[in-house]
Image (spheres, coloured by chain):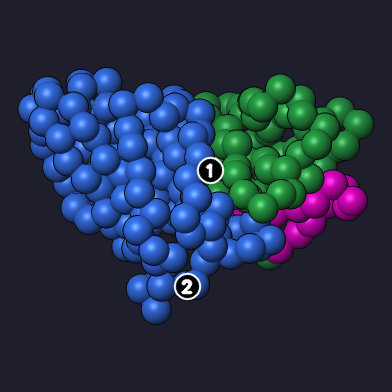
Amino acid sequence: QQQVKQSPQSLIVQKGGISIINCAYENTAFDYFPWYQQFPGKGPALLIAIRPDVSEKKEGRFTISFNKSAKQFSLHIMDSQPGDSATYFCAATVRDNTDKLIFGTGTRLQVFP
Amino acid sequence: NAGVTQTPKFQVLKTGQSMTLQCAQDMNHNSMYWYRQDPGMGLRLIYYSASEGTTDKGEVPNGYNVSRLNKREFSLRLESAAPSQTSVYFCASSGRGGNEQYFGPGTRLTVT
C-alpha cells in the first residue's frame, strides 16, 4: 500500500522529443505528488509537484498529468534537451506533520543531440 | 544560505568499524530525514525526525541509529558497518507543512 511504482527504468530520447515517465500508487491517502530531478553526484531537487485536486500542472517544458481514478501520474518533458539528462524520481506523501516521502525507483533519462 | 550540508563526502570502512555521518541545515526546518540510495531501489527512508527531540524509524532502520542534536543537526551512526550498508546516503530537511524536501549533496560510503 505504501509503494510507488515507476516506469520505465531508463529512457533514451532524441533532442526535441517528448520524454514520458509514469508512476502508479495504491494508497488513496496520498495527497501530494512531487517529482525530483537528480544529476550525477548531486542530491535530488524538487522539479514540480501536484495535489490531487487538479488533473494537470505545467511549469515551462515540464507537465504533470494526474489521474486520480486510475491512481496514476506522469511527468512529460516537452522539447527534451541534453541538459535534461538526469535521473527522475516520482514520490508521494500523506499530509501530516512528518512530510515523509515514498519514492519510486527512478528513471534514468538520456537525451541525445 | 548553505542549505543542507553533509560530511564526509566519501568514506571507506572495513566491516565492523563504526562511523557517524553528519548533517546540518540552516533553513530553520523542523523535519529532517536520512535516506539511502542504491541502484534500482530509489531512495529509501532510514530514519526521520519530525521535530527537535523526536526520531522515528523509516523503511530500512536496521543497523543504524540517529541523533537529532538540535534543530539544525541530525546525525546517522553505523555502529558495526556491514558490506550491505555500502550506499550513497542523503540527508534532507523540510519546513512544517511545506512538503518540499531539500537534499544535501550525499555521502558515498563503501564498506569492504
- Callout 2: SS: loop
Task: Out of B18 and A70, give the one closest to the viewer.
Answer: B18
Name the chain under label 2.
B
Q: Is residue B25 visible?
A: no
**As displayed, is residue A27 above or below residue A55?**
above
Read off the magenta span. A44-59
In the rendered image, which quarter contains the C terminus of chain B? top left
Q: Position of residue B16 (x, y in %)?
A: 12, 24
Magenta span: predominant SS is strand
> Which residue appears at 72% of the width and 29% of the height?
A24
Which chain is rendered green in the image?
Answer: A
Q: Look at mark 1 in the image and give the residue it sits on.
A: A88
Q: Is residue B65 magenta?
A: no
**As displayed, is residue A9 above or below residue A82?**
above
Residue located farthest toward the bottom when viewing the structure as drawn: B1
Within 10 Å of disc 2 (Cα), the crowding (few <14, some 14-19, many 20+) is some
- Image quadrant assignment for residue A26: top right
> Which residue appears at 20% of the width and 22% of the height?
B82
Tag in front: 2 or 1? 2
Is A16 left, or right, of A94 in this rendering? left
Task: Out of B24 and A61, give the one closest to the viewer.
Answer: B24
> Which residue appears at 82% of the width and 42% of the height?
A66
Is A35 left, or right, of B79 in this rendering? right
Is A20 left, or right, of B82 in this rendering? right
Q: Look at mark 2 in the image and give the residue it sits on.
A: B27
Q: Is residue A47 magenta?
A: yes
Within 10 Å of disc 1 (Cα), the crowding (few <14, some 14-19, many 20+) is many
Which chain is rendered blue in the image?
Answer: B
Query: What is the three-letter code of the residue carrying label 1?
Result: Tyr
Q: Position of residue B20 (x, y in %)?
A: 22, 45
